[in-house]
Amino acid sequence: MTVRLYAMTLGRLDVDMTAMIEGGSGTARVPVPGFLVEHPKGSLLYDTGMHPSIQRDPAEWLGEARAGRFGFDYPPGEEVSGRLQAIDRDPARIDLVVVSHLHFDHSGGNGLVPNAGLVIQRREYDGAMDADTAARVGLDRRDVELGHPLIKVDGEHDVFGDGSVVCLPTHGHTPGHQSLKVRLDGGDVVLTGDACYFCRTLEERRLPARVFDRDAMRASLDRLAALEGGGAKLIFGHDAEFWRSVPQAPAEIRF
Protein backbone atom coordinates (compact mmCIF):
# COMPACT_ATOMS: atom_id res chain seq x y z
CA MET A 1 0.00 0.00 0.00
CA THR A 2 1.47 3.30 -1.09
CA VAL A 3 0.87 6.58 0.73
CA ARG A 4 1.90 9.74 -1.08
CA LEU A 5 2.85 13.02 0.59
CA TYR A 6 3.08 16.42 -1.08
CA ALA A 7 4.17 19.80 0.32
CA MET A 8 2.67 23.11 -0.72
CA THR A 9 3.73 26.65 0.10
CA LEU A 10 0.57 28.58 1.00
CA GLY A 11 2.08 32.05 1.10
CA ARG A 12 4.70 33.51 3.41
CA LEU A 13 4.73 35.71 6.49
CA ASP A 14 7.20 38.29 7.74
CA VAL A 15 7.52 37.60 11.46
CA ASP A 16 9.17 39.14 14.49
CA MET A 17 11.85 36.66 15.51
CA THR A 18 11.73 37.80 19.13
CA ALA A 19 8.27 36.18 19.20
CA MET A 20 9.30 33.04 17.32
CA ILE A 21 12.24 31.85 19.38
CA GLU A 22 13.80 32.77 22.70
CA GLY A 23 16.76 35.06 22.07
CA GLY A 24 15.66 35.84 18.52
CA SER A 25 16.05 39.25 16.90
CA GLY A 26 15.01 41.05 13.75
CA THR A 27 12.43 39.87 11.25
CA ALA A 28 12.32 36.87 8.93
CA ARG A 29 10.18 35.71 6.05
CA VAL A 30 8.84 32.22 6.79
CA PRO A 31 6.76 29.80 4.73
CA VAL A 32 3.18 28.89 5.48
CA PRO A 33 3.18 25.14 4.84
CA GLY A 34 0.36 22.82 3.88
CA PHE A 35 0.47 19.13 2.99
CA LEU A 36 -1.57 16.74 0.90
CA VAL A 37 -1.65 13.07 1.87
CA GLU A 38 -3.08 10.56 -0.58
CA HIS A 39 -3.98 7.15 0.84
CA PRO A 40 -5.82 4.32 -0.90
CA LYS A 41 -8.78 5.02 1.40
CA GLY A 42 -8.92 8.78 0.85
CA SER A 43 -7.12 12.10 0.70
CA LEU A 44 -6.42 14.61 3.43
CA LEU A 45 -4.79 17.94 4.01
CA TYR A 46 -2.66 18.74 7.00
CA ASP A 47 -3.42 22.43 7.40
CA THR A 48 -4.96 24.83 4.90
CA GLY A 49 -3.03 28.08 5.34
CA MET A 50 -4.58 31.52 5.46
CA HIS A 51 -8.04 32.82 4.69
CA PRO A 52 -8.27 34.10 1.10
CA SER A 53 -9.48 37.55 2.20
CA ILE A 54 -5.97 38.15 3.60
CA GLN A 55 -4.81 38.46 -0.01
CA ARG A 56 -6.90 41.62 -0.31
CA ASP A 57 -6.90 43.13 3.16
CA PRO A 58 -5.37 41.27 6.12
CA ALA A 59 -7.11 43.53 8.64
CA GLU A 60 -10.51 42.60 7.23
CA TRP A 61 -10.11 39.06 8.56
CA LEU A 62 -7.59 39.45 11.36
CA GLY A 63 -8.32 42.90 12.74
CA GLU A 64 -5.91 45.81 12.67
CA ALA A 65 -3.88 44.84 15.73
CA ARG A 66 -3.15 41.24 14.76
CA ALA A 67 -2.61 42.04 11.08
CA GLY A 68 -0.12 44.72 12.08
CA ARG A 69 2.17 42.14 13.67
CA PHE A 70 2.96 40.51 10.32
CA GLY A 71 3.96 41.20 6.76
CA PHE A 72 2.11 39.17 4.14
CA ASP A 73 3.35 37.65 0.90
CA TYR A 74 0.20 35.85 -0.21
CA PRO A 75 -0.69 36.40 -3.86
CA PRO A 76 -3.72 34.89 -5.58
CA GLY A 77 -3.09 31.28 -6.49
CA GLU A 78 -1.25 30.50 -3.26
CA GLU A 79 -4.43 29.77 -1.31
CA VAL A 80 -4.86 26.05 -0.69
CA SER A 81 -7.53 25.59 -3.35
CA GLY A 82 -5.31 27.25 -5.95
CA ARG A 83 -2.35 25.07 -5.00
CA LEU A 84 -4.49 21.95 -5.29
CA GLN A 85 -5.90 22.95 -8.65
CA ALA A 86 -2.38 23.64 -9.92
CA ILE A 87 -1.55 19.95 -9.41
CA ASP A 88 -4.88 18.74 -10.84
CA ARG A 89 -6.55 17.98 -7.52
CA ASP A 90 -10.15 19.05 -6.92
CA PRO A 91 -10.52 20.81 -3.54
CA ALA A 92 -14.13 19.61 -3.37
CA ARG A 93 -12.93 15.99 -3.41
CA ILE A 94 -10.62 16.22 -0.41
CA ASP A 95 -12.00 13.88 2.25
CA LEU A 96 -10.41 15.22 5.45
CA VAL A 97 -8.50 18.13 6.90
CA VAL A 98 -6.32 17.35 9.88
CA VAL A 99 -6.26 20.66 11.77
CA SER A 100 -2.94 21.09 13.52
CA HIS A 101 -4.43 23.99 15.48
CA LEU A 102 -6.69 26.99 15.05
CA HIS A 103 -4.24 29.77 14.28
CA PHE A 104 -5.01 31.89 11.25
CA ASP A 105 -2.09 30.66 9.14
CA HIS A 106 -2.98 27.00 9.63
CA SER A 107 -6.76 26.71 9.47
CA GLY A 108 -7.87 29.82 7.55
CA GLY A 109 -8.34 27.93 4.29
CA ASN A 110 -10.71 25.32 5.70
CA GLY A 111 -13.63 26.87 3.85
CA LEU A 112 -11.86 26.28 0.52
CA VAL A 113 -12.17 22.51 0.94
CA PRO A 114 -15.95 22.46 1.38
CA ASN A 115 -16.68 18.73 1.64
CA ALA A 116 -13.91 17.65 4.00
CA GLY A 117 -14.39 16.47 7.55
CA LEU A 118 -12.23 18.37 10.06
CA VAL A 119 -10.13 16.19 12.35
CA ILE A 120 -9.36 18.24 15.45
CA GLN A 121 -8.26 17.50 18.97
CA ARG A 122 -11.21 17.94 21.29
CA ARG A 123 -9.26 20.15 23.65
CA GLU A 124 -8.35 22.49 20.74
CA TYR A 125 -12.00 22.75 19.77
CA ASP A 126 -13.03 23.35 23.39
CA GLY A 127 -10.36 26.03 23.72
CA ALA A 128 -11.70 27.83 20.67
CA MET A 129 -15.23 27.72 22.07
CA ASP A 130 -14.10 29.31 25.34
CA ALA A 131 -13.93 33.05 24.75
CA ASP A 132 -11.18 33.73 27.28
CA THR A 133 -8.93 30.92 26.07
CA ALA A 134 -9.54 31.75 22.42
CA ALA A 135 -8.62 35.39 22.96
CA ARG A 136 -5.52 34.59 25.01
CA VAL A 137 -4.19 31.96 22.60
CA GLY A 138 -5.46 33.41 19.32
CA LEU A 139 -7.74 30.52 18.37
CA ASP A 140 -10.25 31.30 15.63
CA ARG A 141 -13.56 29.47 16.04
CA ARG A 142 -14.73 30.69 12.63
CA ASP A 143 -12.51 28.04 11.04
CA VAL A 144 -14.59 25.24 12.59
CA GLU A 145 -17.98 26.90 12.16
CA LEU A 146 -18.24 26.47 8.40
CA GLY A 147 -20.59 23.50 8.26
CA HIS A 148 -17.93 20.81 7.86
CA PRO A 149 -18.38 17.52 9.71
CA LEU A 150 -16.27 17.67 12.87
CA ILE A 151 -14.26 14.67 14.01
CA LYS A 152 -13.13 15.48 17.54
CA VAL A 153 -10.38 13.18 18.78
CA ASP A 154 -8.64 12.67 22.08
CA GLY A 155 -4.95 11.90 21.84
CA GLU A 156 -3.52 9.70 19.11
CA HIS A 157 -5.85 9.03 16.21
CA ASP A 158 -5.24 6.45 13.46
CA VAL A 159 -6.86 8.23 10.53
CA PHE A 160 -7.27 5.30 8.13
CA GLY A 161 -7.09 2.46 10.64
CA ASP A 162 -3.85 0.93 9.39
CA GLY A 163 -1.17 2.90 11.23
CA SER A 164 0.01 4.73 8.12
CA VAL A 165 -1.37 8.19 8.98
CA VAL A 166 -1.59 9.01 12.68
CA CYS A 167 -2.46 12.24 14.50
CA LEU A 168 0.01 12.81 17.34
CA PRO A 169 -0.99 15.06 20.24
CA THR A 170 1.77 17.65 20.62
CA HIS A 171 0.05 20.06 22.97
CA GLY A 172 1.61 23.20 24.36
CA HIS A 173 1.74 25.69 21.53
CA THR A 174 -2.06 25.69 21.83
CA PRO A 175 -4.34 23.59 24.06
CA GLY A 176 -4.78 20.82 21.52
CA HIS A 177 -2.07 21.14 18.90
CA GLN A 178 -1.47 17.95 16.91
CA SER A 179 1.28 16.83 14.55
CA LEU A 180 0.89 14.17 11.87
CA LYS A 181 2.96 11.03 11.32
CA VAL A 182 2.89 9.63 7.77
CA ARG A 183 4.41 6.27 6.87
CA LEU A 184 5.97 6.39 3.44
CA ASP A 185 7.65 3.51 1.65
CA GLY A 186 11.04 4.61 2.95
CA GLY A 187 10.07 5.40 6.53
CA ASP A 188 8.06 7.72 8.76
CA VAL A 189 7.75 11.46 8.21
CA VAL A 190 6.40 13.66 11.01
CA LEU A 191 4.81 16.98 10.11
CA THR A 192 5.48 18.92 13.29
CA GLY A 193 3.22 21.91 12.65
CA ASP A 194 3.86 24.62 15.21
CA ALA A 195 4.95 22.17 17.89
CA CYS A 196 8.40 22.93 16.47
CA TYR A 197 8.87 26.05 14.35
CA PHE A 198 12.52 25.52 13.43
CA CYS A 199 15.23 22.86 13.46
CA ARG A 200 16.94 24.80 16.22
CA THR A 201 13.78 24.88 18.31
CA LEU A 202 14.29 21.15 18.75
CA GLU A 203 18.07 21.25 19.01
CA GLU A 204 18.28 24.14 21.47
CA ARG A 205 14.87 23.93 23.21
CA ARG A 206 14.32 27.68 22.74
CA LEU A 207 10.56 28.16 22.84
CA PRO A 208 8.47 30.92 21.25
CA ALA A 209 7.49 33.86 23.41
CA ARG A 210 3.76 33.11 23.30
CA VAL A 211 2.94 29.55 24.33
CA PHE A 212 -0.21 28.16 25.93
CA ASP A 213 1.64 25.68 28.18
CA ARG A 214 5.44 25.74 28.24
CA ASP A 215 5.83 22.46 30.11
CA ALA A 216 3.52 20.69 27.67
CA MET A 217 5.41 22.14 24.72
CA ARG A 218 8.72 20.92 26.13
CA ALA A 219 7.21 17.46 26.55
CA SER A 220 6.03 17.60 22.93
CA LEU A 221 9.55 18.50 21.81
CA ASP A 222 10.85 15.51 23.76
CA ARG A 223 8.38 13.31 21.92
CA LEU A 224 9.42 14.69 18.54
CA ALA A 225 13.09 14.20 19.42
CA ALA A 226 12.37 10.56 20.34
CA LEU A 227 10.64 10.01 17.01
CA GLU A 228 13.58 11.56 15.18
CA GLY A 229 15.96 9.40 17.19
CA GLY A 230 13.94 6.37 16.10
CA GLY A 231 14.50 7.20 12.44
CA ALA A 232 11.57 9.47 11.56
CA LYS A 233 12.20 12.51 9.38
CA LEU A 234 10.76 15.72 10.85
CA ILE A 235 9.38 18.55 8.72
CA PHE A 236 9.35 21.73 10.75
CA GLY A 237 6.60 24.32 10.91
CA HIS A 238 8.11 27.59 9.68
CA ASP A 239 11.79 26.93 8.99
CA ALA A 240 12.60 28.83 5.78
CA GLU A 241 16.06 27.35 5.34
CA PHE A 242 14.82 23.80 5.89
CA TRP A 243 11.80 24.40 3.64
CA ARG A 244 14.08 25.04 0.68
CA SER A 245 15.07 21.37 0.85
CA VAL A 246 11.47 20.10 0.84
CA PRO A 247 10.19 19.09 -2.63
CA GLN A 248 7.10 21.04 -3.63
CA ALA A 249 4.02 19.55 -5.26
CA PRO A 250 3.64 18.02 -7.79
CA ALA A 251 6.90 16.38 -6.70
CA GLU A 252 6.40 13.88 -3.90
CA ILE A 253 8.20 13.88 -0.59
CA ARG A 254 10.15 10.64 -0.54
CA PHE A 255 12.06 9.09 2.30
Image: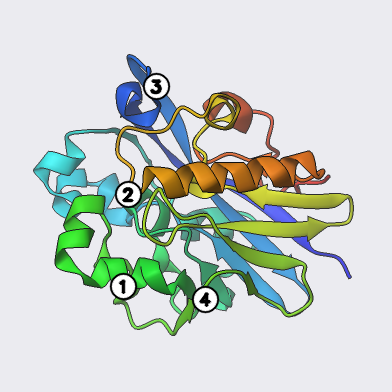
Q: Of marks 1 and 2, which one's residue comes earlier in the chain? A: 1
Q: How far apart are marks 3 and 2 (CA)?
A: 23 Å
Q: What element carries label 3?
A: strand
The residue pinned by badge 1 equals: 126
Q: Residue at x 72, y 55 (%)?
A: 5
Q: Of marks 1 and 3, which one's residue comes earlier in the chain? A: 3
Q: In this view, does 145 lie to the left or right of 224?
A: left
Q: Of marks 2 and 4, which one's residue comes earlier in the chain? A: 4
Residue 111 appears in view: no
Residue type beneath disc 3 = Ala
Q: Where is residue 168 in the image (x, y as percent from the top left)?
A: 60, 61
Foreground: 70 or 77?
Answer: 70
Residue 94 is drawn in which quadrant? bottom right
Q: Of marks 4 and 1, which one's residue comes earlier in the chain? A: 4
Q: What element carries label 4?
A: helix
Q: Distance between the residues labelled 4 and 3?
A: 34 Å
Whether tag 4 and tag 1 are in contact, CB under 8 A, the answer is no
Q: Is residue 240 left or right of residue 214?
A: right
Relative to 163, is 239 above or below? above
- Classify the position of the N terminus by image quarter: bottom right
Observer-side mark, 2 or 4, equals: 2
Q: Distance between the residues labelled 2 and 4?
A: 34 Å
Residue type beneath disc 2 = Phe
Q: Of marks 3 and 2, which one's residue comes earlier in the chain? A: 3
The residue pinned by badge 4 equals: 92
Q: Where is residue 127 in the image (x, y as percent from the top left)?
A: 29, 66
The residue pinned by badge 2 equals: 212
Residue type beneath disc 1 = Asp
Q: Disc number at residue 28? A: 3
Circle 4 Cα neighbour tier, 10 Å, few/some/many (<14 / 14–19 / ≥20): few
Residue 221 appears in view: yes
Q: Of marks 4 and 3, which one's residue comes earlier in the chain? A: 3
